Amino acid sequence: MILDIANLQGDGQRQYQQDFFALSDADPAAVTTHGFDLVLADGMGGALDGAEIARETVDLLYERLVPVAPSGTPRERPMPATSNEQVLSAIEEANTRIYQRYHESGGTTLVVARIREGQLWFASVGDSNVYLRRRGRLLELTRRHEYLYDLYDHVLDGLLSIEDARDNPQAKALSSFIGSGSLRIDHSQEPFALESGDVLLVCSDGISDTLTTTQLLEASAQSAQHCCDLLEDMIKTVALPNQDNYTAIVVCYA
Amino acid sequence: MKQCERGHFFDDVRYQECPYCEKVQPAYGSTISVSKEIVEPTATASATAREPEALEPGATAPENSATPAVEPAIQSIAPATPAVEPAAQTPTPSQTTAPAIQAAAPAAQTPTPTPAASAFPAATASATAASAPQEIGATVGVFTSKVGIDPPVAFVVVIDGPDKGASFALKAGRSFIGRGADSDVALPGDEAVSREGHALISYDARKNSFLAASGQGRQISYLNGVELVDPQPIKAYDLIELGRSKLSFLPFCGEEFSWDAL
Ligand SMILES: [Zn+2]
């Protein structure tokens, strides 16, 4: 299993960096032995809270997922989650911890993705994105936990018009996040096999809200680092006056 | 490029220490509170705070014959075959497994049966002040009790694909399209169609109109050649494509006729 991995992060026009992420050792030998894990969180909350929450959540998950740090030193308290159920438990643990401290005045999105023996498994909470590029197509593997989708449910029942749903001031609010009193976790039911040439793109909404899927598709045609460079160029070209923090993790599977 | 203790790749020629790991510092002194960023979580929290009612575990669905009582579609990822063809099945995300939130599994766009719908007034009262919950909630019930039967409101004909020639009468509420035999529109021959809830068509009895929507699992469907992302209104002879199947839609209710008129 050969993985080509790169990451990108920028502050955009924000005063704080509220995205945080972590990757396991990308060294080929480590990947062969342990597989590969990534964690991404996009914090929300006033001032520094969002950043702290994202950092704490990522660190908690990283501690649970990754037994050996990239430097090769075993972690102090290795508690590697061997099953995906344990990862879900760790996500719930993070949720409880953040909820008890912030009572929904702050929180974070979270994506965890694991690649083991050519199989991908992931979990997502909130509106960060997991894309898979396969044979020239970009598949969005998650549906954002936005209140809009709950409203769409009512649209389908004829209780609300599409316009009312879209115009709802809460439409973009997160319907699930780490630190929520009513957590929902979306995750793959079972790991599924990656194909040679697949590209996994995990990003915060600072990427996916600024760039089009066509741009993501174009960037993901490149090697991992080149993809990250291209994404950054694209974001700087769009130059949104209120560009959000942006983070991307790109994993090319060969 | 070097990996730090958290695995961040950084340019160790430019940076001595990982720039991503740096502890966050207030950029412009500590007195600043950024209003936008404070507002966001509040909105989030209040929207979410309403959720539990809608998603109360163990809530029993009230009898409502106008809404097909469809099990929350459990999409299993086809381990070996995530989708690649234009309309094949995509690797499906999304099942909530935590026992405490099992009932919440039909997330956002899940074909949620009645619990969420019945909780609608409470769930969205403040979010959608414009709509009047009681009146709305009653509409569907009135529709069925008046008629006393469960009559067809539209028809779907499979015009291409393994199940070509099959036809289906749609009832009021939501009709789910899937490979499983218990789907309202069942396409048992099309392996590229999800077992449950690949796509759905809903009939709005109040407005006498139809909507097509993708199912929960991000399987791709097309309406007249365009990917169905948001729910879209559909009309006579519109073409719905999913998997290797093409379906034509024929409304029965509409301007010319509605069961309410009887
Ligand atoms: Zn670092």
Image (cartoon, coloured by chain):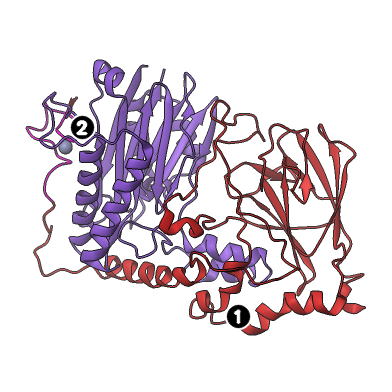
Residue ID for mark 1: B131
Same chain under badges 2 and 1? The reply is yes
The answer, for residue A220, to whether it is visible in the render is no
Q: Quadrant of the N terminus of chain A?
A: top left
Q: Quadrant of the C terminus of chain A?
A: top left
Cα separation, mark 2 vs mark 1, equals 50 Å
Amino acid carrying label 2: it is Gly
Upstream in the sequence, badge 2 or badge 1?
Answer: 2
Quarter residue B131 falls in: bottom right
Label 2: how many Cα within 10 Å (few below 14, some 14–19, many 20+): many
Numbered circle sitting on residue B35: none
Is disc 2 placed on a helix, strand or loop? loop
Asked whether B8 falls inside the magenta stretch, the response is yes
Amino acid carrying label 1: it is Ser
- Image point 42% across, 34% down: which residue? A121
Can you say whether B199 is above or below B116 in the image?
above
Q: Is residue A225 left or right of residue A132?
A: left
Numbered circle sitting on residue B7: 2
Q: Nearer the viewer, residue A76 or B93?
A: A76
Magenta residues (range): B3-23
Chain given the colour red? B
- Image point 37% across, 28% down: which residue? A115
Label 1: how many Cα within 10 Å (few below 14, some 14–19, many 20+): some
Q: Is residue B52 left or right of residue B243?
A: left
Is disc 1 placed on a helix, strand or loop? loop
Chain letter belonging to callout 2: B
Q: Position of residue A95 (x, y in %)?
A: 30, 56
State the hue of chain A.
purple
Label 2 close to label 1 by CB (< 8 Å): no
Q: Is mark 2 within 8 Å of ligand 1?
A: yes
